[in-house]
Amino acid sequence: MKKIPLATALLSLGLLGISLPTFAEEVQVAVAANFTAPMKTIAADFEKATGHKVVLSFGSTGKFYTQIRNGAPFDVFLAADDATPEKLDKESGTVAGSRFTYAIGKLVLWSAKPDVVDAKGDVLKKNTFMHIALASPKLAPYGQAAVETMNKLGVYDTLQPKFVQGESIAQTFTFVSTGNAELGFVALSQVFEDGKLKSGSGWIVPANLHQPIRQDAVILTRGKGNKAAAELTAYLKSEPARAVIRSFGYDL
């Protein structure tokens, strides 16, 4: 087996903006459910590049906020919005200056079946379905974006009796993928791969129908001094990580 010179290996890590750690550390990361697939890939790549261990937990941004405020042992928080990390900043729950936007999410109206959702989202006004799923707007920013979209289109009041709400965007996706709801508002990253929908039918909601879904990352107070936490957030800004993020349909 051909050996790679140590200098070459160190240079490769340096190009990624990652320094080789003196010893490996573990970082506990709370990740918004919409970012599950890309973060699994990014974490695996980061572990190979640095030797650190990344422990991921996925859920709704609102629930994570409550858990963090109650002392949950997370070092880094990848939220589905920018308001929650900013709130933690003001409450002295973060490492000052560590917050940044790692992705801008996209909302999609999706059905697991082909030809249910049209290319313009007119299915919402036709209102011929029994159930429509969305994440809780109180817990999940994607749910709030779905509510804003329906209000802008003037269909919220009409459709409200048909709502099936999930605690997170992951649960919402399950409702739609299993057919418990004919269609629903989910994160584009959940149904997007290689530049197209993986299955079913969907309408990517225009950005002007809801507030931008700016997703911020931040190092929490517990992560202060943790090399793995600092290097993971740095890696999220690197081109290899950004390429993964783009591949799942996010803007940067």
Image: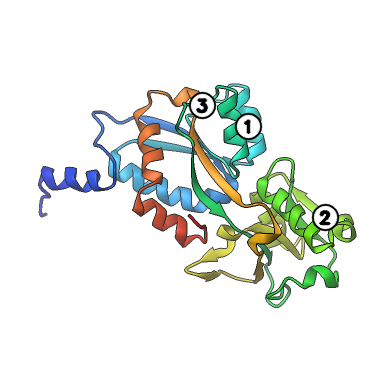
**Which residue is tagged 1?**
65
In the depicted structure, whether residue 3 falls above or below residue 53: below
Alpha carbon separation for disc pair 3 and 2: 36 Å
* Residue depicted at 21% across the width and 48% down the height: 12
Q: Which mark is residue 220?
A: none
Alpha carbon separation for disc pair 1 and 2: 25 Å
**Which residue is tagged 2?**
163
| Three-letter code, disc 1 | Tyr
* Residue depicted at 66% across the width and 69% down the height: 203
How far across and down, in percent of the image, does residue 29 sit?
49, 36
Left or right: residue 42 versus residue 158 is left
Left or right: residue 126 versus residue 15 is right
Q: Earlier in the sequence, mark 3 or mark 2?
A: 3
| Three-letter code, disc 3 | Thr
Question: SS at mark 2?
Answer: strand
Q: Which mark is residue 94?
A: 3
